[in-house]
Image (spheres, grey):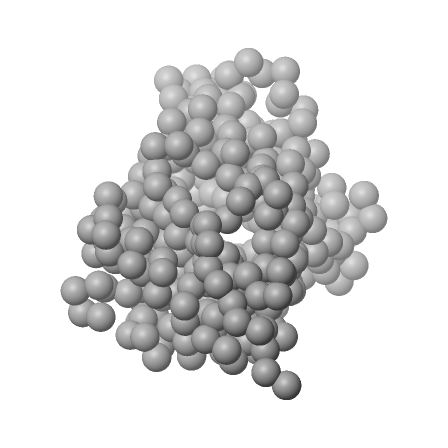
Amino acid sequence: MSQPPFSLRDAKLPEDYPALAEILSATRPDWPTSAEDLERHDAKRDPAHYFTHVVAEQGGKIVGLGGAGHDDFSFEEWRYWGGVNVLPEARGQGIGAALYAELLRRLQERGAREIRTMSSSKPHAAAGRRFLEQRGWKVNWERFESEIHTENIDLHAFDDLLSGVAGEGVRLVSLAELEADPERNRKLYELDWILFQDVPLGTALTKKTLEQWVKEEIDDPQLRPKLSFVAVRGGQNDPLTGDYVGYSTLGRSRGEHYYIGMTGVLRSERGKGIAKALKVAAMRALHGEGGGVIKTFNDSPNKAMLQMNEQLGFQRTATMYRYELKLGEA
């Protein structure tokens, strides 16, 4: 039986959000999303950056979604980030190819020279990787996904580590406890930027405004302030970071697992076990709330963090690939 024809149109928001969430959840089952998540994500997007949505409709139902816009993590006017997703039952009809062609046309009209996207080594992403590679996309970077369940951790094994950090004069304080600090967000913003300079990401970073950073990081409803910790050194008063010398965040996805965001400490504080202690503090706090699975993502050159995670008991589960398309070479 032949399928009805499909057509492309711009997304109508907010009314299309439920359909878009259905598509994304079906094509990325390990990271489900909701209409509320998508609306919130679009609302916090930097309005100075370009973004476009296009959908495929078939028989009165939205069956595919394409989205692309500026790479705000590593901004250049000519660099973009995007993706195409089609419901599994609607594949094999050229819907993904049509969405891709339309997005590519829009970005080329804007003078795009490079487009990036991410894909996973997991089986559900295999077709998407083939789709990209058939169109000239190349893997430019690898990021490893690892996970651990708190029930498999002997948290008392790290008692000496935590005592040693405390003996160094460093307190591990949750974001929730630091809410009374009027300078908390500003100090974390500056600390985050300093720490990111030392993360091997294979790309230049763009510093966001304080307001935009808070909107994306601190105000993210998936962030768990009681499970996210800051390393505080009493008596220190750096003009940018104050007495904050490191931090680690934990968020919770709709897939019911937790995930680690930034973890790091200032260069002057390294080698003292503080970064590991921050993660242990989060694990202990999560254990106290019933426990769960924690995922973390580390770039392949980040040997120190990969080794630390292995020592904590994290197990490798997948590889994330950053694909790039150089339009001059396509």
Residue 203 can be seen, yes or no: no
Q: Is residue 304 left or right of residue 147?
A: left
Front-most of 296 and 58? 58
Q: Is residue 183 left or right of residue 288?
A: left
Q: Residue at x 29, y 59 (%)?
A: 105
Front-most of 236 and 40? 40
- Give the image quarter of residue 83: bottom left
- The spot of residue 52 in percent (x, y) is 41, 47
* Residue reaching furthest to the left: 328
- The spot of residue 112 in percent (x, y) is 23, 53
- The spot of residue 276 in percent (x, y) is 56, 48
- Location of residue 115 with respect to 160 vertically, above or below: below
Q: Residue at x 58, y 30 (%)?
A: 219
Q: Is residue 289 left or right of residue 208?
A: right
Q: Quadrant of the N terminus?
A: bottom right
Q: Residue at x 52, y 80 (%)?
A: 92
Residue 212 can be seen, yes or no: yes
